[in-house]
Amino acid sequence: MQISLLTDSIFPYTMGGMQKHSYYLVKYLARAGVMVDVYYGLAEGMGVPEKYDEYSEEELKNIRFFPIYFPKSGRYPGHYILENYLFSKRVYSKLIQHPTPDFVYIQGFAGWYYLQNRRKQQAGNNIKTGINFHGVEMYQKAVNLNIKLQHFLLRPPTAYNSKKADVLFSLGGKLTPIHRKTAPSSTISEIPIGITCDWLVDPNKLKASDKRRFTFIGRYERRKGIEELSSVLSGEGRIIFSSTEFHFIGPIPSEKQVKGYANIKYHGAIHDEGKIKELLQASDVLLCPSWSEGMPTVILEAMASGCAIIATDVGAVSEQVDSSNGILIRPGDKKQLKAAIEKMITLPGEQLLAMKKASIKRIEEKFLWEKVAEQTITEIKRIIEEH
């Protein structure tokens, strides 16, 4: 089977959930014997990679890379929409130079121009396509007016692209109803993102100490809910939380940090995956109080590391977290966030340990990349055969 993957970029050249998903999707499809052509974006001025050392020699036998520079159009409201459209034209120009694949897998807007024009060519009309908008955050709750404007501008092209594809890949949870509303007549296929097995810890070696350790991982971004978390930690909850450690990993500006508490530690940005694993494996609970999400990789990483989870019930988070391994709360609700933290602090050790083990079990059952890739291949074959 031959698949063409169209994406705005790919890890490690660009950081982000969609870019990591593209990276691992290519790697594990290739491992399974699928031929994959990767059309991906590079920032202007970035050199074209001479080698792809992140992939094994066996994987590279099944992969061809086609880097394409991402255009810049200036700074004005909605500039990113035009840039994505122009990039999709560049992708299309490159794509039609190569033999027809069996399936086109589109990440975000990278296939916009292809979807717009494929009906004009008989060959293109026969190729089945799937599109993955991951969190479709433009349809989720906006934290402020600026974000609301961005969402408003992104909705029409998202709906247009969704309706043009043969299948919409959904991460599940609250995202599938969004897809159904956006493209009512489209076929929807629920497939999660994955994580590699090297993240898994031995559940028999887990323990829950009396002094609970909480961790937040992420950059400072308003939708990540860090302001609500900081408010809880620096407000009336400071006495209750005094015997507990809180660790923040990510580039959080000094002026946004909670000051004056020895039990609140900021580690800054950490790019060493081994160090992140070490910190997560030493933690009891991951905090993810976002206003909107798709299916956060950081939650999967924390689950595989043996953490219980406190997260907002947004996007596909409910596919990852339920009462067996954590607590789901409403986005922006500081009272619920505080209550959830208090519950985790006072939870008997054996109950917390059961949650931590449940996280690992769920990863093993549903979220390992080998299983996600197998599920993706099975679904693509079904789409090709049915059409």
Image: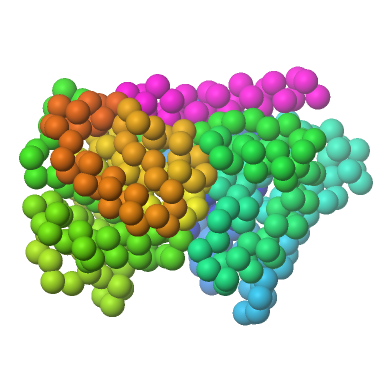
Picture residue at 39% right of the left edge, 32% below the top: 322
Q: Which residue occupies 78% across, 51% down?
A: 160
Residue farthest along the bottom direction in this orientation: 75
- Taking the image as shown, residue 182 lies to the left or right of residue 170, namely right
Q: Is residue 225 above or below residue 183?
A: below
Of the 4 image quadrants, the one containing the C terminus is: top right
In which quadrant of the rendered view does residue 366 lie?
Answer: top left
Horizontal and vertical percent for residue 316?
50, 40
Left of 290 or right of it: where is 183?
right
Towards the viewer: 331 or 263: 331
Q: Which residues are magenta?
A: 360-387
Q: Is residue 163 left or right of residue 65?
A: right
| Residue drawn at the location 30% of the way across and 73% of the way down | 256
Residue 384 placement (x, y as % from top left): 74, 25
Could you tell me which residue is drawn at 20 percent across and 59 percent down?
237
Q: Which of 259/218 is in front?
A: 259
Residue 374 lies within the magenta run: yes
Q: Which SS type dominates the magenta stretch?
A: helix
